[in-house]
Each structure stands twice: as structure tokens, then as C-alpha cells.
Image: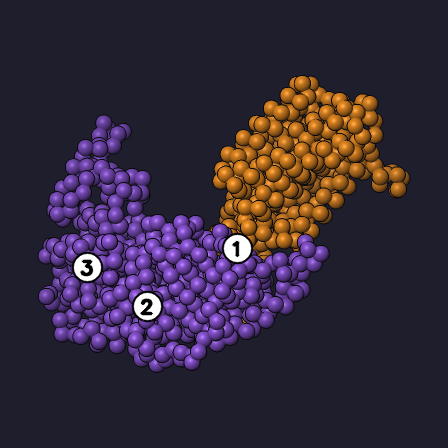
Amino acid sequence: MSDSSDQLVLMEGINKSFPGVQALIDGFFELRSGEVHALCGENGAGKSTLMKILAGVYQKDSGKIFYNGREVDIPNPRAAQLLGISMIHQELNLMNHLSVAHNIFIGREPRRAFGLLLDEQLINQQTSELFAQLHIKLDPRTRVADLSVAQQQMVEIAKALSFDSRVLIMDEPTAALTNAEIEDLFRIIGQLRERGVGIVYISHRMDEIKRISDRVTVMRDSRYIATLPTASSSIDQIINLMVGRTIYESTPEVPEEYGEVALEVRNLSRAPVLHDINFTLRRGEILGLAGLMGAGRTEVARAIFGADPRDSGEIFVHGRKVTINSPYDAVRAGIGYLSEDRKRYGLALGMDVEANTVMASLKDFLRFRTLVDRIRARFVTDQQVSNLGIKTPSLQQAVRHLSGGNQQKVIIGKWLTADSDILIFDEPTRGIDVGAKNEIYHLLNSLAAQGKAILMISSELPEILRMSHRVIVMCEGRITGEMPISEASQERIMQYATQREAVVS
Amino acid sequence: MQTSSLGTLRFSMRSNAMQRVLAFSALIVMIIIFSLASPNFFTFSNIVSILTATAVNGVLALGVTFVIISGGIDLSIGTVMTFSAVIVGVLVTNNQLPIGVGLIGGLAAGGLCGFINGLLIAKLKIPPFIATLGMLNIAKGLALILSGLKPIYFTDTPAFSLIAMGSVLGAIISGFTIPNAVLIMFGAALIASVLLNQTVLGRYTFALGSNEEATRLSGVNVDSWKIRVYTLCGVFSGLAGVLMASRLNSAQPALGQGYELDAIAAAVIGGTSLSGGEGSIMGTIIGAFVISTLTNGLRILSVPQEWQTVITGAIVIAAVYLDIVRRKRQR
């Protein structure tokens, strides 16, 4: 352990807001050289935002950043790199068609022949040296596209170190890694720590944090909560700080009995991401679908909805077999899908609230089978706006200008207007602030109470535990566990979510 | 909420209409400048000739406006127009079929080309730029083949030239001899406006350009609607072909290429965004008038043809740049 004289980074009083969301309030963070500093908190607590400010991705609205005791200004990622601060993002930033070596030296390639030609040999040689230092076994000439996610991450780390980084920020680095790969990563992190690099480790996984970090900083609701030495704190203590008291206040009220089976999926497969998926979903039920990143949860949703092709599988809606080859078929069968990425897959951002609300059911708003009945569309949209509590200055407001929570409600309104009985929510509260989250939760409950059948996909275990009546867990494209909520716990779900044995067969 | 967001609302409304207002002001300013510069500009006969000159390009631009709003592009409209004109000539002059059959044939020929464009783009997933570039050459080649490389004249059917150049208005109000082509353009614009703003087709045109994947995931059969958008654009090109043939009293197989760029320029000057999701019929018509007024005015001021082209190019670049600036501010 190091003492405070080794202070590398100090962030104080950092504020940052995005349209509709206060992402950071009086943010604080301190990093020492040679330490692994875990940063934890629920999704949306502000961890990534704080670190993106340090890495120059975002600009702080106010506050101070000190680096090696000197106040610094970090206007862009390039400036951060020059200071020696590198960030490895959750979504890796590599160019798939270039070689590993070219990715590492992009923008500063060694040249030869008076700077006219790239010095391939030197690029590859320097990359090999870098890999050797880290004991990474990779050919510098491999194309990034041909690497596994774990190997790509190693490339990102090597790239960060090639800038002589003193600070390395890792945003959920193990989310997509296998156990063996995680061991490799930890070995490299250990080496970096010995070299005096300060490492910020953003993660949800308590066991990893406990194992690898020296100190833990907890954030909640966009604020700094506390910093603890890892060795003398328990996992429970950290989790309590993370969730405050709010999360466990309510556990789902499971209805005494459900309605008929609304959706049944049999033998759904899509190589290589889905293998033999079977489950049923009843009216009035909220079925939680849990699993780690890459387990195939979104793929299940998209396959049911007809957004992706599938190899095999039958889908029954209200007991009748339906043929779903496209979202068009799915919508007609009464299925609605709320994607995890609203802006990309859910909304026509430039169009207004009304147009988005009637988008999936425009055929019901026609006069003479061709003209859009604006008056009725407006009336129905107005109803949804007041029922769902959508905050918008008018129905003609472009949805781009609404907050995340209100955008999500517009999509819910779209499916309600289309009379969908089966609603698939993929990460319903991703990117939504805490207050709005609660509203979405209330909405889900009341939709279930009205007899809608709800499949809820979530990466946040507290969300799964708070909302679901029943939980199914996926790992690597298979369903590995199912349990009523009364028997579910974070530990049990994690156990199924990491149950890889089934894959070997 | 109500009050705090009113500002953004007003701003977004203003910025949406901004380009149209700008284009319209540019048109007015141009008219004033040209009027002051030459006494021959603001005369009834010159205004009529500007209107007439706008008709063909205006109708072409209407169709491509739909395609551009949907997030696509159609480079084939110019030669499809020619192809349609040649079809009319083949039907009416070479086969001596009634003019009505020729008209329907011309519109259908354009629609068919558009339909094929749509198929290539929606089903085979060929990028619009490439698919319609191919169609540009196919239509151009077919027009030359069918016409035997020579213009087809409508000398046997004098009524044909009345479609565009006759004046129903002049017959009603004496002296007010505005050619039918102008009326047809405004009529087509009216229909286009209803299609774009009040029908499912129009709604999905905007939705496709705004976010195609979200539209697909809303259960909309996007392939089929895309095909309809390109088909509609083809029909407008066919109509432009009929007007062109009628105005020249002949189908000129070598004419047409290059018209697509003027039409696209008209749409863009009028505020249709090349990245899709935004645009208006009113804007496109204003854009078409900006181009024809500029060309006409420069000719009256005896600016050489080649400089007219240079200036038109500069105006298009300026219009697109303004659009980009506006968009950036909107973010």
C-alpha cells in the first residue's frame, strides 16, 4: 500500500450534467500510484462519467482536477493521453480491419524513406517488445477482427501502456471475459501495479473487487459516497453503500395467480449465440431474464421478435403457433420489443412524440385507408402522455429533446397504442436517472397488473430481484437456471450465470 | 416543465423552417436585384418563362424529395425522365396510339424504373447511390436504343404539345397565358404535399430517413415502403418526361443526364436534408425557383453560360453548408 504522498490524481467538486440528467454532483476521486482503485456503484451512479471526464472524453461543468499535484485541464482524449492517462472503454475502440500493431501505433506510426513510407518492420518489432513486457502472446500482424474480446482488451491495454501511461482506467474489463481470460488480465494488472501505474477498476463484480483492489470508492445517485481500504471492508458493507436503502425497500408483490400462458418459446436456436431456448410467460407475469454480457439475452428477444433470423424454434402466442419472420409479424401477433438502445433501435429521434407513439399502429389511424387521421392520433397520444406521465411541452416536440426516462415512456406508449399483450423490455432503465427509474418500475408493475405479459432483460441484479416474479438465467446462449423470486438471490443468479459446464458437451 | 421547455420547442420549430425561410428570402432578394439590374427581368413574359423553365425540374425534384427524406438518393431521375419521354414517343408517334395511352405509358415507364431501383435497394441491399447510378446508364442506353439514336417528333399529333404549352388559364382569363406545364407542376406539388404530410407513405418516408432500424422494429415492412418511395419518384420522373416531350414537341434521347443534379440541388436548397428525415414540398418548389430564377437572371444580365453553371454550383454548396451549420446548432 502506498501513502498519500504518492497521490497521482485528485478530482474535487466535479459537476456534470447532460440534457435532462445531472450525471455528477460534487464528484470526488483520488488515485495513488501503484494502487488498484475500484470504483463501484450501480449503473447510472456516475462512475463512467467521472472517469470519462478524467480521460478527456467529457468536459466537466465545474470542479478541479489535479495530476501529480498540479491543476490540469483535460480538453480531449489526446490531452489525457499526453498527460499519461488512458482509458479502456467498455466498448473497445479498435479498428477491426487493421493489424494489432497498426492499432497500437495509429496516428504515430514510425516512418521510413524520409517519412514517405510506413516502417512496417519497426511497428511490428515495437509491438512485439510491448507484448513481451506484458507476457502477451500475440502476433502483431494479426487483424484485430480475428481476435477474441479478451485479446482485443489486451491490445487496448498494450496501446495504453505504449503511451507510458501512469493512470489506466478500465471500465468493466471482465464483463465479456472467461475465467481463464480474467486470470490473464489480473496477472497483467498485477505487473502494472508493481511498475507504479495507478489503476482505476470500474466493476460490478464484488468478488473481483475484493480480490484485486487496494481501495474502493463507492458512488451513488451521481454523488461520491465513501472511499474504503478493501482489505478491511466486507462485501456487504460495500453493497450497502452502493444501494443505500432504496433498493431493498420493495420486493416484488407476486400475484397469487397468473392468467393464461401468453408466450411460449420452444427449442429456439440460432448458432452460435442461442441453443435450445425454452420458456413460457403468462399474462400478469414479469419474467426476469438475467445473465452476463454476451450470454445471449438480447439475442433471445430479437429472435422472438423476428429482428434476427433463427435456425429453429417455435413460438406460441396465447396457445396458438405463430410464424414470426420479421418484426412486422411479431407486432401483428401482439408482441412489442423495447430495445436496450433506445436511440438506435427504438425511436425516430427527429420525429415528434405523436409520430413515434403511433409508429407501430399507423394502420389503425387511417381515413379512406390512406390519410393519417391526425385528430385521432393526437387524441390517443394525448391519452398515453397523461397515462404514462410523459413530460413533454407538446405532442409536436421532437423526441430528441426529451430525457431518457421520457423517451422510454414514449416507446412504452407506442406498444400500448399498438395493443401489444406481450412486452419485451431489454434493459428498461439503462441510461435513465434514479427518479425516472422508479417511475418505470411502477409502470412495469401496473402493466403486469393489467394483464400484460412482460419479459424483462436486465444486467442489474438488484433490478431483476426487485421487479421479477420469476427469474431465468442464461449463460453462453443457454438457459442454465430458473427459479421463483422467493428462491432467487444475487449469489444464486451469479452462480447460474457463470455455469459454463453445460457448454463443454 | 411546461415553461422551461417552451424555449427549446420554439427554437426547434424555428430551425426546422429556417432553411425554407432562407431559401425564400434568397429568392426574393434575387428577384429584387435582377429587377433593379435589368428592366427586362420583371416583365410578364419573363416571369412566365421562368415559371415554364421551372416546371420540368420542379416535377423531377418533387419525386427525389421523397427519396432523399427517406434517407436515400436517386441519380437516375434525369435519364429515367428521358426514357419515359422516348416511351411516349414510341407509343404515340411510332405506333400511332392515342395520346392518353402515351401519357400512361410514360408515367408507367418511370414508375417501373423506380420500382426496379427500389427492388435493388430494398431487397438486394445495393446502396442507393450505386443502384441508381446503374439505372442512370440503363435508362440512358434504353432511351437511345428505342429511339434509334434520333429524336422522335410529335408532328402528327399537334395536340400533344398542348399538354405542356397550351394554356387553359389563358383561355379562361384572356392575356393570362401561363402554360399548362406550370399548372401541372403546381398540381403535382399539391399531390406530393398531401402524400408527404397526410398519408402513411409520407409518414414512413420520414420515419425511414429518421431511423430505419427503429422503424423496422416498430413492425413496419420497411422494404416494401422503400420500394414504394422509389416507385413514386419514378412516376414523377415519368411525368417530367411527358412535360419535357410536350414542351419540346419531341422526345430527345440525348437529353436528360445532368437534370438529376439540378433536381437534387432544388430539394437541398429547399431544406431537404441529405442525411434524411427532414424536408418539405414547399421547400423543394422554392429551391427549384431559386435555380431557374438564377439561371434566367444571369442570362438576362448576359453572364456567359459557363459562369452560370459555376454560380449555381456555388449556391448549392452554400445551401448545404447552411444546412450543416443549422444542424450543428440544433444538437
Other-residue count near label 3 (Cα within 10 Å), few / some / many at <14 / 14–19 / ≥20: many
Q: In this rendering, would A268 be left or right of A327?
A: left
Q: In this rendering, would A188 be left or right of B169?
A: left
Q: Is residue A285 above or below residue A83?
A: below
Q: Label 2 lies in what chain? A: A
Q: Find residue A482 and name its label.
A: 2
Q: Position of residue B226 (x, y in %)?
A: 57, 45
| Earlier-in-chain disc, 3 versus 1 | 3
The chain whose colour is orange is B
Q: Label 3 lies in what chain? A: A
The chain whose colour is purple is A
Q: Position of residue B293 (x, y in %)?
A: 68, 37
| Earlier-in-chain disc, 1 versus 2 | 1
Viewer-proximal residue, B205 or A302? A302
Q: Label 1 lies in what chain? A: A
Amino acid at circle 1: Asp
- Where residue B317 sits, quadrant-wise, is top right
Q: Residue at 32% across / 65% down in the picture?
A: A473
In space, the residues marked 1 and 2 are separated at their CA atoms by 29 Å
